[in-house]
Image: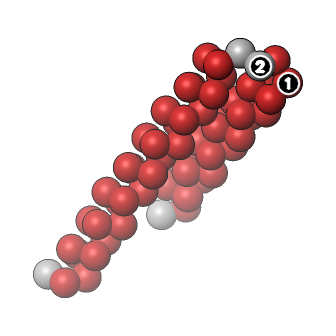
Amino acid sequence: MALFRGLFFVLLLGAAISFALYAVTGQSKYRKFGLRIVIGTLLAAFGFFAVLIVQRIA
């Protein structure tokens, strides 16, 4: 459980760094990369919590 929390934190930190680089440099590649990280992290989080809910029900 702690591994997943740490992984989510690192991914969101990477997205924040990408957005900061976009703000400093103005290059859209950093914004696109940050959005991909956020979307992937959210999808993984929803999947993770869906598995937890299914385990509680079953």
Residue 57 vs 1, above or below: the answer is: below
Q: Residue furthest bottom?
A: 57
Q: Amino acid at mark 2?
A: Gly
Residue 56 quadrant: bottom left
Q: Amino acid at mark 1?
A: Val
Residue 53 in the figure: left or right of residue 14:
left
Identify the residue shown where x is 59% and y is 41%.
11
Q: Position of residue 19 (x, y in %)?
A: 71, 34
- Which residue is labeled 2 in the image? 26
Quarter holding the C terminus is: bottom left
- Which residue is labeled 1 in the image? 24
**Labels 1 & 2 near each other (Cβ < 8 A):** yes
Q: Position of residue 48 (x, y in %)?
A: 35, 60
Numbered badge on residue 41: none
Residue 2 quadrant: bottom right
Identify the residue shown where x is 54% and y is 35%.
35
Q: Give 44 or 19, whichever is nearer the viewer.
A: 19
Residue 24 vs 44, above or below: the answer is: above
Q: Is residue 10 visible?
A: no
- Classify mark 2: residues with Cα within 10 Å, few (<14), some (14-19) or many (20+): few
Q: Give 28 or 53, whichever is nearer the viewer.
A: 28
Identify the residue shown where x is 69% and y is 30%.
18
